[in-house]
């Protein structure tokens, strides 16, 4: 079960993906944005590999830890470059 904070973060991040797509700032499936979960600072939300930014929903976001392991839900493909870059940024 997700917390209300995680639910809000999921909704906001999914909206950010769709806004980026709306303004043409996305690059098909090879880009990503993420958000750290405030209640679980070693976990972050990131998009699945293969989803266009305009297709991202709150429910489609994956929760990963700083080693790139998916922490809950169905295991989905995540862009390896996204894992490396975003976990490093969120670990800093």
Image (cartoon, rainbow, N blue to C red):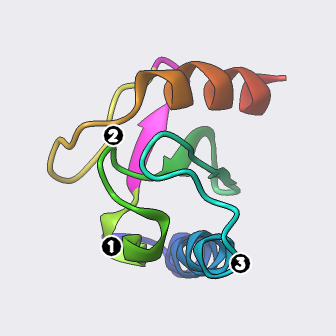
Q: Nearer the viewer, mark 3 or mark 2?
A: 3
Structural distance between the alpha carbons of marks 2 and 1 = 14 Å
Cβ–Cβ under 8 Å for marks 2 and 1: no
Return the residue at label 1. Answer: 59
Point out the residue furthest to the right here: 92
Between disc 3 and disc 1, whose residue precedes?
Answer: 3
State left or right for residue 49 relative to residue 28. left
- Within the magenta stretch, is there residue 65? yes
Q: Is residue 82 above or below residue 11?
A: above
Return the residue at label 3. Answer: 23
Where the N terminus falls, by quadrant?
bottom left
Q: Point out the stretch of residues depicted in magenta.
A: 62-67
Q: Residue at x 65, y 32 (%)?
A: 86
In the image, 21 versus 57, the foreground residue is: 21
In the image, 62 versus 31, the foreground residue is: 31
Label 2's element?
loop
Structural distance between the alpha carbons of marks 3 and 2 = 31 Å
- Within the magenta stretch, is there residue 52? no
Q: Nearer the viewer, mark 2 or mark 1?
A: 1
Return the residue at label 2. Answer: 71
């Amino acid at each position: 079960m997700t917390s209300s904070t995680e639910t809000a973060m999921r909704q906001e991040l999914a909206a950010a993906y769709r806004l980026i797509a709306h303004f043409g700032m996305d690059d098909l499936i090879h880009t990503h944005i993420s958000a750290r979960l405030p209640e679980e600072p070693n976990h972050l939300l990131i998009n699945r590999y293969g989803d266009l930014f305009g297709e991202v929903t709150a429910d489609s976001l994956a929760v990963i830890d700083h080693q790139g392991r998916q922490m809950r839900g169905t295991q989905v493909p995540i862009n390896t470059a996204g894992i490396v870059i975003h976990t490093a940024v969120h670990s800093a």
